[in-house]
Amino acid sequence: MLNKSLLIRFMLAILIIIQVIIFDTPSAEAAVDSYVERYLDAKQPVEIKLNEQGETKKFSAEDLSTGKQMFAKNCLNCHVGGANLVNPPISLSLKNLEGATPPRDNINNLVAFFRDPMIYDGSDYTYFCRQVTENWMSQAQVEQMGAFILRAAQKAPAWGAEGVEQN
C-alpha cells in the first residue's frame, strides 16, 4: 500500500514537472517587449549605426527589449521618455545625441559614454551619470541599451521631445 502511494505521488510530480517545462517556458516572442515591437518598429532585426564611419550592426527585437530593460533599470529615473531631468535642454533626442562631443549617435560612442560619462561638450567628467563598468554590465548589454536609446530616438513618438515644461 505504501509503495503504491509513493508511486502515485512520484508520477504526479513527474507530470507537474513536464507541464511546467512544456507550458510555462516563455517563447522567444514573449521576450519581445510590446513597446519595442509597436513604437520602435522592430519586428525584424534593425540596423543601428555602429560608429562614426557609418558602419551598422543589426539588433533583434529581443536585443532591443533587453536594452529597454537595462535602460528602465538603470537610467529611467533621470531619462524617462528620453528626457533629461538633470539638464532639461539636452534630452536624448537624435538631434542632441548627434550634437554631443563626440557625437553619441552611434553604438560605439554611446557605449564609450556609458563607460566613462562626460558632459555634453566632452570637456569634463559628469557626476550625474554613473560609470557603467564591465563588472556591472557586459559589452553586449551596454550595446543593447545603446541600441534601444538610438532606435527610440529614431522612431518613438515624443522620445526626447523638446518643449516639455519644467516646474
Image (cartoon, rainbow, N blue to C red):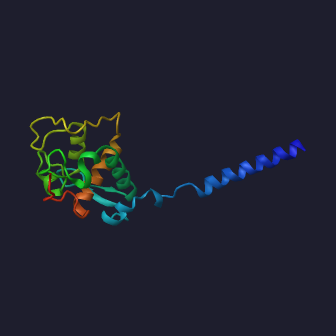
Image spot of residue 54 (x, y percent) = 19, 55
Q: Position of residue 128 (x, y in %)?
A: 19, 38
Left of 8 or right of it: where is 164? left
**Residue under the point 30% across and 47% down:** 143
- The image shows residue 24 at horizontal and vertical percentages of 58, 55
Q: Residue furthest right?
A: 1
Give the quarter of the image for residue 74: top left
The residue depicted at 18 percent of the width and 35 percent of the height is: 127
* Residue 19 position (above or below residue 39): above
Is residue 127 shown left or right of residue 28?
Answer: left
- For residue 72, side relative to residue 124 (left or right): right
**Count of picture labels:** 0
Residue 156 falls in image quadrant:
bottom left
Extreme-front residue of the structure: 167
Residue 91, horizontal then vertical, whole percent:
17, 52
Q: Quadrant of residue 159?
A: bottom left
Q: Foreground residue, 112 or 79? A: 79
- Position of the N terminus, as image quadrant, is top right
Identity of the residue drawn at 21% across and 51% down: 106
Residue at 25% from the left image edge and 55% from the top image edge:
81
